[in-house]
Image: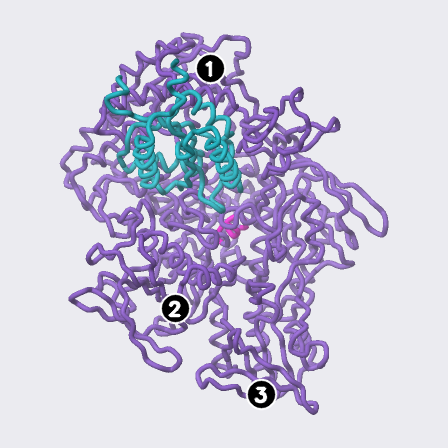
Chain colours: A purple, B cyan
């Protein structure tokens, strides 16, 4: 057996989790193979219209990540493929894969789409969930990555039209499946989930009644590129529905089906769909959600739920729907349900079934091939303290395959899996990655602009409408254009060679390509310039396909005029382009972790496993944080043993400097180069480091209600836990009150962990004192995911769950030494008294009191609730907007042990993408200051969302280039025009705009 | 081309790279047809659009200017550039009115990467509207 490990990792599944994992791996010095069964990556998120709780457009935020993965030099996309075998072990796996034929040569296909336009076959569009048609030769969706077509051979009639029309000759009807073997050091599983097949719930009529759709189908209906162009229509008659019902828990929390677990995301996505739906019809929609518990447990989810009720007029009915019937004449639907003990029937125009998550298709085969264990629901088996590890060393898991979860939690776990997978092969960092060498750049600063213009026919996509030769002639007459030509496909490999030749032949120092969109093709052409020894920023594109020939197909003359205008305006800008350098900064390969609780300790250990040194700063005199007060878990794991072993690991680790009793005094610098002052016992000390992980945790709300503090029998759940753990428990009746200090006016959000905590304690009571009666007074029980099993177990053990609402809060009194609660019984509609020995309050988790101070020092934002606010709640859950600072644990939001561990590992992976580099090179499009013009007013400093501008010692603005993201908002507001954005300077943008208006005169 | 026959407005569009420009691309991919009166200038963020760009375009005879970015509140790729655009364009419209230029010539729209149809509709609508208002009064001034 060889000792050598392989510095590559296989990621299985190209949804948002898989893509994030691959990006983190490839950005920290390892090679990633990203394999997906589908012809393109993107997974379920690519099918969503919006995302909760911010209503972001899903594709807008996902597409840049897909493009990045698609063109990353160290990510190898293997689509339309599956795993067939596995040999070897951690460090040295051999994975056999089968790549199914696309019947398209991927090297040759340039994604122009002429084939699909001419294909005579109409097939069912699976991307739009069968609600619309597509051709037999197709891409899954317009933004597909990779942008390579595929032929659906089941539907293809073999007419040969596509083969004839494909100018690059990419159609290969005879192409066969291929097999390959990949050598990798570790493997990450991110195969996602399958939606529950709603046909199995026959009582809801899916598949029989046309106007009963699933939530994912409804997502496509809402989408502007969906089957009805973003209008909500009934599939049966194309009418706009006036009344829509959403039925929750279809295929989840269902013992009959054996799907006992909660699918964790459906409550929120249904609320989102109900909110958004109203924007997609010209009328006021009546929307009703039928639910059991609304599980709005995530960051600011409850506020969203409240807005749905109060601002958006969504009606919520707490009831499990019995069945749905259809009026066969009108296709209207009758929903039968029980509310307040009474059977009711209500008519709706459309019913949306909130389908739950099932393990991915063929999961048993995958598990068998890989040799990993599945849990009872056939999701991947994991443990509380190792939520990322599968049962087989070297194979890790993330996303919905580990347990049903939403997008940000999948992204968190993806980064965590990247941390784990790269740590196992840390010694191999940098060994298999490709670093491309380019010829030295020619200095063109003193040359007159000499522009070459390359105009693409894109087969017939442009040339069939726009008179390309006429545009070439127009271009030739423009000032500083010394060469212009047309190409059948400017993006083809042979044209790249040609562009390089022409650059030499005509001594070109700037290049314009008029073709498709720079969003997909600019990187390719920039690369060509680099290969020709030109600075890659001396390049611009005119979009004469997506924004011209394709949208003016019936007006060829006007399209030609427009194409000329677009080329002229881009040439006008190009004349003013300058050579840009990519700013570079050195990186100190040391991390600073603030907070010595479970999250901070985990992040610190993970960073050392990546071979980085860490300073771990803890305010208190010992490590452990909140975990010190957790004595047992609902499962069999022992948290105290775990804590002891982590603390031991930390103290024995030579790479970690632990600073106890220490506080942060000051933070200076920026990504790669921070200098932080810490204080301990009055002594100040400076440490230098490249990144910061914020893991400062949170604290418990100190209740003022329910006689807490005045009657010793009133405890918090933590105090009850301690009593139970230390044999100090003897009550014959225990009442627990949920949401104490949470979901109130002052603190509108849910604290996420208290339902689980109450149930854990209730089960413990039943274990140590089975005769004790336990009542849980709750608003919604939020045991999401597999935690639902404990809820069920508690109910089976005889724990009584009684719901209350804000109008009927429990009333606690103490009379003659008796501790009493008056609880509202919602079915009998009466108050009833319970005498109790212990009252346990499930109190809110609240931010640490000094979060604000730390946030100010780090220049990072907090939420309204006072928790730290990440860069993007969906896709950048571990990063702050300021580069080099990361977030994990309860400082972000209340969360469970396994979630804190995932986040901490994920934060370490994100940090490793920086620490693994000797120097950081960033995009050259950054703002710069004309020091002679700047008067130091500071407006740009206050506007910059990234804190990238500061005042220098003379009081004038200075750009910290490595932090600048190139948005240019500083340039748009400088009263002295002293600051502007490179590549998008005022002069360049104005020249581009005005050249359009000034006709051909400048020629 | 005689302007007397039918007035064909020239519109400049400043579109943010991440949402609106992507939406305009999607209109193309989906082959949605709209009038060929708009010329798009790509910027990274709607927050990059300095009101002076719009004034320059109007001064040089543009009949309309479209600024389009990511939806409020949080689609913006740069966190809050769209809010900055919103404030600036609102102010600019007030200024334009003072100078006797119809504020309708300047339009701010939020268009997501999946709203190809919205982009096409906005352009159609804007062309119709500006046809009704007539040519930019400054156009003659420049030619004279």
Q: Position of residue A157 (x, y in %)?
A: 14, 41
Above or below residue B94? Residue A277 is below
In the foreground, A388 or A210 = A210
Q: How many marks?
A: 3
Q: Nearer the viewer, mark 2 or mark 3?
A: 3
Q: Secondary structure at mark 1?
A: helix
Q: Position of residue A523 (x, y in %)?
A: 44, 28
Q: Chain of mark 1?
A: A
Horizontal side of residue A340 vs A212, given as left or right? right
Residue A568 image-quadrant placement: top left
Report the span colored magenta.
Answer: A410-416
Q: Position of residue A636 (x, y in %)?
A: 57, 70
The answer to whether dots 1 and 2 both sit on one chain is yes
Q: Chain of mark 2?
A: A
Label 1 vs 3, first from the N-terminus: 1
Residue under pointer 1 = A575
């Amino acid at each position: 057996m060889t000792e050598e490990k392989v510095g590559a990792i296989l990621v299985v599944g190209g949804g948002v989790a898989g893509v994030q994992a691959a990006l983190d791996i490839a950005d920290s010095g390892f090679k990633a193979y990203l394999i997906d069964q589908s012809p393109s990556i993107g997974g379920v998120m690519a099918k969503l219209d919006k995302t909760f709780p911010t209503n972001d457009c899903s594709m807008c935020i996902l597409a840049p990540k897909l493009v990045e993965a698609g063109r990353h030099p160290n990510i190898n996309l293997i689509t339309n493929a599956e795993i067939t075998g596995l040999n070897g072990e951690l460090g040295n796996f051999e994975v056999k894969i089968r790549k199914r034929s696309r019947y398209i040569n991927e090297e040759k296909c340039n994604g122009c789409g002429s084939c699909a336009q001419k294909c005579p076959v109409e097939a069912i569009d699976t991307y739009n969930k069968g609600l619309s048609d597509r051709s037999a030769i197709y891409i899954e969706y317009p933004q597909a990555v990779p942008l390579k077509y595929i032929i659906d051979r089941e539907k293809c009639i073999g007419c040969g039209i596509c083969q004839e029309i494909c100018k690059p000759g990419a159609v290969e009807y005879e192409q066969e499946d291929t097999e390959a073997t990949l050598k990798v050091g570790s493997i990450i599983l991110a195969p996602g989930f399958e939606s529950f097949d709603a046909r199995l719930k026959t009582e809801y009529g899916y598949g029989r009644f046309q106007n009963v759709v699933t939530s994912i189908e409804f997502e496509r209906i809402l989408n502007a590129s969906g089957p009805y162009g973003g209008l909500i229509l009934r599939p049966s008659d194309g009418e706009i529905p006036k009344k829509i019902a959403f039925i929750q828990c279809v295929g989840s929390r269902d013992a009959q089906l054996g799907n006992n677990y909660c699918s964790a995301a459906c409550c929120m996505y249904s609320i989102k769909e109900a909110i958004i739906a109203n924007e997609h019809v010209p009328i006021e929609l009546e929307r009703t959600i039928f639910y059991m518990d609304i599980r709005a447990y995530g960051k600011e989810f409850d506020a969203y739920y409240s807005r749905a009720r109060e601002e958006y007029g969504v009606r919520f009915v707490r009831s499990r729907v019995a069945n749905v019937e259809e009026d066969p004449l009108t296709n209207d639907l009758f929903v039968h349900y029980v509310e307040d003990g009474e059977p009711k029937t209500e008519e709706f125009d459309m019913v949306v079934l909130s389908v739950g998550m099932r393990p991915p298709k063929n999961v048993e085969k995958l598990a068998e091939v890989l040799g990993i264990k599945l849990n009872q629901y056939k999701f991947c088996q994991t443990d509380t303290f190792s939520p990322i590890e599968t049962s087989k060393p070297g194979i890790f898991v993330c996303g919905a395959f580990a347990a049903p979860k939403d997008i940000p939690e999948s992204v968190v776990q993806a980064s965590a899996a990247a941390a784990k997978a790269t740590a196992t092969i840390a010694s191999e960092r940098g060994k298999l990655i490709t670093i491309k060498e380019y010829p030295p750049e020619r200095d063109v600063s003193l040359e007159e602009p000499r522009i070459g213009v390359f105009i693409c026919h894109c087969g017939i996509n442009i040339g069939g409408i726009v008179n390309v030769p006429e545009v070439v002639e127009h271009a030739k007459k423009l000032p500083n254009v010394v060469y212009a030509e047309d190409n059948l496909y400017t993006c083809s490999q042979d044209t790249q060679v040609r562009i390089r030749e022409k650059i030499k032949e005509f001594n070109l120092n700037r290049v314009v390509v008029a073709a498709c969109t720079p969003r997909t093709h600019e990187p390719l052409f920039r690369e060509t310039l680099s290969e020709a020894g030109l600075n890659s920023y001396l390049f611009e594109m005119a979009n004469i396909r997506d924004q011209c020939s394709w949208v003016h197909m019936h007006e060829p003359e006007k399209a030609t005029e427009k194409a000329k205008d677009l080329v002229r305006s881009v040439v006008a800008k190009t004349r003013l382009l300058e050579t840009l350098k990519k700013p570079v900064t050195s990186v100190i390969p040391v991390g600073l972790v603030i907070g010595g609780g479970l999250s901070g300790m985990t992040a610190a250990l993970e960073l050392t496993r990546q071979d980085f040194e860490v300073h771990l700063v803890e305010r208190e005199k010992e490590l452990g944080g909140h975990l010190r007060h957790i004595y047992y878990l609902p499962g069999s794991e022992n948290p105290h043993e775990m804590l002891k072993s982590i603390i031991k690991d930390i103290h024995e680790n030579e790479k970690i400097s632990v600073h106890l009793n220490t506080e942060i005094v000051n933070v200076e610098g920026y990504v790669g180069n921070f200098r932080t002052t810490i204080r301990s016992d009055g002594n100040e000390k400076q440490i230098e480091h490249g990144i910061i992980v914020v893991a400062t945790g949170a604290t418990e709300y100190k209740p003022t209600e329910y006689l807490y503090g005045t009657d010793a029998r009133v405890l918090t759940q933590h105090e009850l836990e301690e009593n139970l753990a230390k044999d100090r428990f003897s009550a014959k009746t225990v009442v627990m009150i949920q949401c104490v200090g949470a979901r109130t006016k002052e603190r509108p959000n849910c604290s996420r962990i208290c339902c689980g905590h109450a149930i854990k304690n209730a089960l413990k009571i039943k274990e140590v004192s089975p005769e004790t009666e336990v009542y849980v007074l709750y608003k919604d029980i939020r045991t999401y995911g597999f935690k639902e099993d404990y809820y069920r177990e508690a109910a089976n053990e005889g724990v009584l769950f009684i719901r209350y609402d804000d109008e009927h809060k429990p009333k606690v009194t103490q009379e003659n030494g008796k501790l009493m609660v008056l609880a509202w019984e919602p079915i009998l509609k009466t108050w009833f008294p319970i005498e109790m020995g212990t009252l346990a309050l499930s109190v809110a988790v609240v931010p640490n009191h000094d979060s604000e101070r730390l946030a100010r020092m780090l220049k990072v934002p907090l939420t309204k609730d006072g928790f730290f606010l990440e860069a993007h709640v969906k896709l950048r859950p571990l990063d702050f907007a300021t580069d080099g600072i990361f977030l994990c644990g309860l400082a972000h939001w209340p969360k469970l042990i396994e979630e804190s561990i995932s986040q901490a590992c994920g934060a370490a992976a994100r940090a490793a993408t920086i620490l693994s580099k000797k120097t950081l090179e960033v995009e050259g499009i950054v703002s710069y200051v004309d020091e002679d013009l700047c008067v130091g007013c500071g407006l740009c400093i206050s506007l910059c969302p990234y804190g990238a501008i500061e005042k220098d010692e003379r009081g004038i603005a200075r750009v910290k280039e490595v932090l600048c993201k190139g948005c240019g908002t500083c340039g748009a507001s400088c009263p002295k025009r002293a600051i502007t954005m490179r590549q998008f300077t005022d002069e360049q943008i104005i020249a581009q705009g005005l050249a359009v208006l000034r006709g051909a005169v400048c020629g | 081309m005689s302007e007397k026959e039918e007035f064909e407005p020239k519109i400049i569009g400043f579109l943010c790279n991440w949402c609106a420009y992507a939406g305009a691309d999607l209109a193309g991919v989906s082959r949605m047809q709209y009038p060929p009166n708009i010329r798009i200038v790509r910027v990274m963020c709607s927050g990059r659009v300095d009101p002076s760009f719009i004034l320059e375009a109007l001064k040089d005879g543009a009949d309309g200017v479209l600024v389009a970015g990511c939806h409020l509140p949080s689609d913006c790729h740069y966190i809050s550039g769209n809010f900055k655009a919103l404030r600036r364009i609102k102010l600019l419209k007030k200024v334009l009115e003072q100078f006797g230029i119809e504020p309708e010539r300047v339009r701010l729209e939020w268009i997501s990467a999946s709203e190809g149809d919205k982009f096409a509709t906005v352009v159609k609508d804007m062309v119709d509207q500006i046809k009704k208002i007539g040519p930019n009064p400054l156009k003659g001034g420049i030619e004279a």
